[in-house]
Image (tube, rainbow, N blue to C red):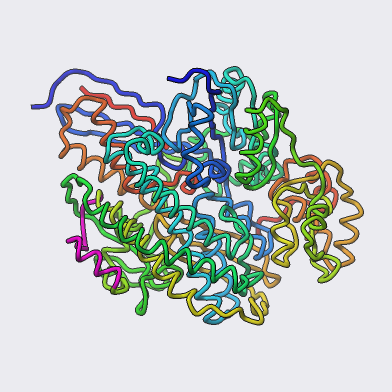
Amino acid sequence: MASKREIHINVPVLTRVEGEGALEFDVVQGVIQKLNLRIFEPPRLFEKFVEGYEYDQVIDMVARICGICPVAYQMSAVQAFERLFGIDPGPWVRDMRRVMYCGEWLQSHALHVHLLAAPDFFGFESAIAMAEKHPEAVRRGLRLQGLGNDLITLFGGRSVHPVGVRVGGFYKAPAEEAVADMVKQLEEALPQAEALVRWCAELDFPHDEQAFTSVALSEPGEYAIGSGRLVSGQGLDIDISHFESHFEEFQVPHSTALHTQLEGRPYLTGPLARLNLNFRQLPSPVRAVMEDCGIHFPSHNMFHSILARAIEIHLVIYEALQLLQAYERPGVSAVQVRPQAGTAFGCTEAPRGFLWHRYDVDERGDIRRARIVPPTSQNQARIEQDLCASLESFGLDHDDDALRQRAEQVIRNYDPCISCATHFLKLKVSRR
Amino acid sequence: MNSTKPKLAVHKFSSCDGCQLALLNLGESLLELPKYVDITHFAEAGPNNPNAKVDVALVEGSISTPDDIERIRQVRENSAYLISLGACATAGGLQALANLADRDAWMAAVYARPDTIETLSSSTSISEHVKVDLELHGCPVNSQQVIAALADLLAGVNPVSERQPLCMECKRNGVVCTMVTKGEPCMGPVTRAGCGALCPSLGRACYSCYGPAETVNDGALAQRLQSLGLTPEAVARRFLFITSGASPFRDAGLRLRPPPLETDE
């Protein structure tokens, strides 16, 4: 039976997450009574800054919400304005944006898998410490991350807050030689990505099945990244413009990031949710490696998130290669834009889950009002729910250090980006 | 333990984490870094000793809460050399736009219970609170800037920060002027160089993510931009953008801007 000792744990900072947060929970008679994932990244009020600015300026402003996934912010915004203005930038722009987005998934997932998550599985404090014992794995991760950054840079000039995307297309199409060089690098990376999936499949995953609802974008002909309808494992299937009638955002006292619920309940967004809903759309070579490793989706074990990221790394390298192999530089890289007044909706799959934007725009294309719902704030309620179940099944009689480590690992499964959600972890457990 | 290597800390305040990526995006070179420095604190990468004494502290983010003020004083006390990184740490960041508006009204528009959230009424640079030894500009700073500064310090040389306007960098790189050839409303003449002339090399106008250059002739540029067809309000928006907390841009923008931005109705 659980002890009746009174214990107080306080871990001042959760490391290896993007941003600042803390965790506190009370254990009474061996049961978790209250558990708060506290996010106290100071609010930056982005939704208000963009008011009065021009639609193309907004593309560069919202990128600044997150240094890890700026492309996602740019893509959701650009999609919103193009939908409202009735612009179809054509297949070339659509394909090249998908390639650029593949670059962001690649760098973000490779960073998370190797630098943030893997040290937990091998018992190291950091990837730099892990590199001494597992140099090849860490080097592979850093190479893949670098390739993702190079892919973004190809279209955006730099990987953090890139400058290439505009409403209507791109500012400039990359030169054919630069693309040919990238194709060579992607070809070399493909076997590395396969090896990464096999490496992750061998990890020692805790058994921790939980019931939860997955939500992701879904497209009929492809594994959804830059567009699609919002679907859930429980039958939700809506146009992104109907988000607000099904999802509710609200403030809780212990977080500067708003919480979100679907029909009054927590849900999961991110790589595991995407694979659960869309694994049938993975290209066959990617599925073949997965099946060869004995990996099956859907999965309701959140520790499989690292595996989901590895599979998505394989996917994006494969996709980028397919889309760039026949690259021809177009005469123009963007179509004409004529702004229109109205309400613009945009939604794309950021590395951590879907990222929803709404803008009220006037006839000049200036922003009157904005609303942005990032993936980490959506996952907060699910993380709290997961922690309660996961820590109880892990065993609350473990010592404080073991509990803290387990809690951090559970939280890292979500790769929370607290800069996005507003950002990190202090742990406070009180047991009575 | 090798105690002869200099100790390095990376601290984060209010920011997007993008400037820390100048280190995390180094690729395999990241693994070389521990040969030269002991990374004592870098929470996003793992090491967590925020209060350790260090030789060099890299500081990302702006000061926007009462706790931040205490924390940055502590960082200063513990660090022999302090480098502030990026637009947030050197000018308050994009979020300094709130300094020009009614922040309370903004908080109320985003949060149902703004009273439960502790913030200051402004977002400010590190140098407004403590002495800073070197400022590296950019939104974000790039790896080259950060590594060059660290390498200089390791070599016992005083690092320097870029001061010239972007126009000089365009000329050096042979980039065609977007303003002269295409009439683009380029901020290059008043913007600090150092990015590699990224936007002009893609054929677009510079939007000044590196902030003001050492000397800023904002009047002449504002006139030129208006002659290209921009309204004074649109010119103001270009000064009051990524680094609205930097005084040359703040003053220029406020001079051009008609009464405060309407927020609807």
x, y (%) of residue A75?
53, 65
The residue that appears at 23% across and 40% down in the rendered structure is: A388
x, y (%) of residue A411?
32, 42
- Check the image and report above or below for A417 versus A333: above
- Check the image and report above or below for B69 versus A419: above
Q: Is residue B244 left or right of residue A3?
A: right
The quadrant of the rendering that contains the C terminus of chain B is: bottom right
x, y (%) of residue B238?
76, 55
The quadrant of the rendering that contains the N terminus of chain B is: top left
Q: Is residue A307 left or right of residue A316?
A: left
Query: How many badges with numbers are in the image?
Result: 0
Kindly tell me whether residue B263 is visible in this rendering.
yes
The residue that appears at 35% across and 32% down in the rendered structure is: A125
Kindly tell me whether residue A264 is visible in this rendering.
no
Query: Residue B81 is drawn in which quadrant?
Result: top right
Query: Residue B244 is drawn in which quadrant?
Result: top right
Q: Nearer the viewer, residue A20 or B193?
A: B193
Q: Is residue A431 left or right of residue A38?
A: left
Q: Is residue A295 magenta?
A: yes
**The magenta segment:** A285-302
Q: Residue furthest left?
A: A1
Q: Is residue A88 magenta?
A: no
Q: Is residue B104 left or right of residue A414?
A: right
